[in-house]
Amino acid sequence: MGEKVVAGQFDLSDRQRYRDKLRRCLTGLERLLAEQRFDRPQNLMGLEIELNLVGTDGMPRMLNGEVLERIASRDFQTELAMFNLEVNIAPHRLGGRVFDRLAEELRTSLAYADRKAGEVDAGIVMIGILPTLDRDDLVSSNLSDVDRYTLLNDQIVAARGEDFVLDIDGVERLTCTSKSIAPEAACTSVQLHLQVTPGRFADVWNAAQAVAGVQIAVGANSPFLFGRELWCESRPPLFQQSTDTRPPELQAQGVRPRTWFGERWISSAYDLFEENLRYFPALLPICDEEDPLEVLDQGGVPSLAELVLHNGTVYRWNRPVYGIADGVPHLRVENRVLPAGPTITDVIANAAFYYGLVRALAEEPRPVWTRLPFEAATANFDAACRYGIDARMVWPRRGRLGGTVEVDAATLVRDELLPLADAGLAGWGIERADRDLYLGVIEERCRRRANGASWQAATFHRALEAGLSRDAALAATTRRYRELMHRGEPVHTWPVGLPEPVPLG
């Protein structure tokens, strides 16, 4: 939710007016779709990465204001907490050696940011959840000094009406409470954008939902929170619980959480925006002066400001996005599944796998979502979050037999999905060198059954076996991770364990 908002109080009339404006915006979107006003295909993709600031000791540093002032680039922005930053890469056209170009841009940007962070004794780390975070780090006083974060926190807390409960049962169990949404800031992600025409939107979104579990299985990188080893990818349960506006009674009634996988395949982008209005009350009822229907009547393009703002407070793992570029409206699928890191090569490999796979699946004559129950896609996502590269997936059976079969995620990716991703990337016009390099990273992760989560867990346990305390082992693991991240070799090549004996702590 990147809109600039001003903190303030809302009364009953604000909420009623906002609801009315949302309905007018939805009608405006419906008209734009019916009138075919959207941009033509441009094969555009975009990339955002959320980052952590840490000291040389591996501990979080609450310094994003100072670091951003030194970076002085519009490509870098604040995120929810003071130990977070976000880097945004300008849209690129899919084709040629685009992934190598993206990798080089990111290396340049992050190296510069890391040097600037070093001026205040901090550094950049790309990781799903920073292992050294403590409960005292994730409190409202450490939220970034930006009105929209304060206001969002206040509104979610007010909607819930009681403390947030975190309860994640994994390798170990974590149970605690929070008085704010600050624990959400532990979740640092990669967001992959793909601009699509309205006619293609449903196929691309359905394909992205179908492969969300596979993305997590190969890309998991968040096994620790508050000193506990939880799920291989602990971001999704943490994000859901730390933004959950539902007290237990509403959960028992089946009210949907704001962080949501969804519950059905769709036939239009309109379906998702309409669901957001139907199921989720406004958190930030801030009204724009524009009347979207009047703008349409005059031949203009409405900003649909209220719809965009509301959409930004519903945290789908594949989110619909309405935007305007050069006066022309467009739609994007924003894929929010992946954790940040471990390296730029890993991030770009995850992106190449995703963009190739969704194109291939969206163009299949018998689409996967016509053969896979939505409930199975949801279960795949949950299994991948828990078990990472060792997860088992339900997937449509190949051949004429039909039905589904349970299959090992790494085997599914190597035998069936990587060839599809390669064909999809070829369809985008990606050159063979990029396809081989980045899909080869995914293949090696599957062959070795190694990803960021498995490396973190294995290195942590080696440190424990060497006699370190839990806190010292997590800090040493984080310092080693940071060192290897900046070297840049993909995570499946990282040696497990610490490089040399360290003092007991």
Image: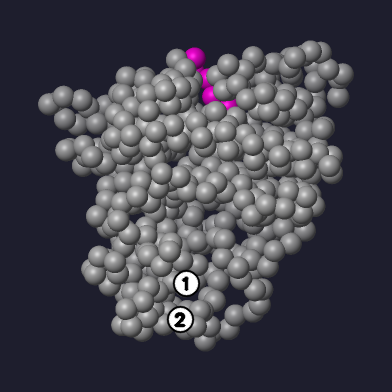
Which mark, residue 305?
1
Residue 502 in sight? yes
Give the answer, above or below, for where 212 lies relative to 455.
Answer: below
Q: Check if mark 1's residue and mark 2's residue have beta carbons within 8 Å.
A: yes
Give the answer, above or below, for where 374 lies relative to 56.
Answer: below
Which mark, residue 290?
2
Horizontal relation, residue 415 to residue 67: left or right: left
Question: Residue at left 40%, top 74%?
Answer: 302
Image location (x, y in percent) of residue 449: 49, 18
Please state which amino acid type lies under the numbered disc 1: Ala
Give the answer, above or below, for where 41 lies relative to 51.
Answer: below
Between 257 and 342, the residue placed more toward the observer is 342
Near mark 2 (Cα within 10 A), the count class, few <14, some 14-19 or many ≥20, is: some
Region in magenta: 448-452
Question: Residue at left 34%, top 66%?
Answer: 274
First of labels 1, 2 by sequence position? 2
**Residue 344: in magenta span:** no
Name the quadrant of the C terminus. top right
Image location (x, y in percent) of residue 195: 38, 51
Name the quadrant of the N terminus. bottom right
Residue 170 in sight? no
Which mark, residue 80?
none
- Count every numbered label the image shows and give the total: 2
Image location (x, y in percent) of residue 240: 53, 50
Q: Measure how far apart labels 1 and 2 are at the Cα level.
A: 8 Å
Question: Residue at left 42%, top 72%?
Answer: 304
Element class at badge 2? loop
Please state which amino acid type lies under the numbered disc 2: Glu
Between 248 and 50, the residue placed more toward the observer is 50
Element class at badge 1? helix
Colouring style: one colour
Horizontal relation, residue 47 to residue 81: left or right: left
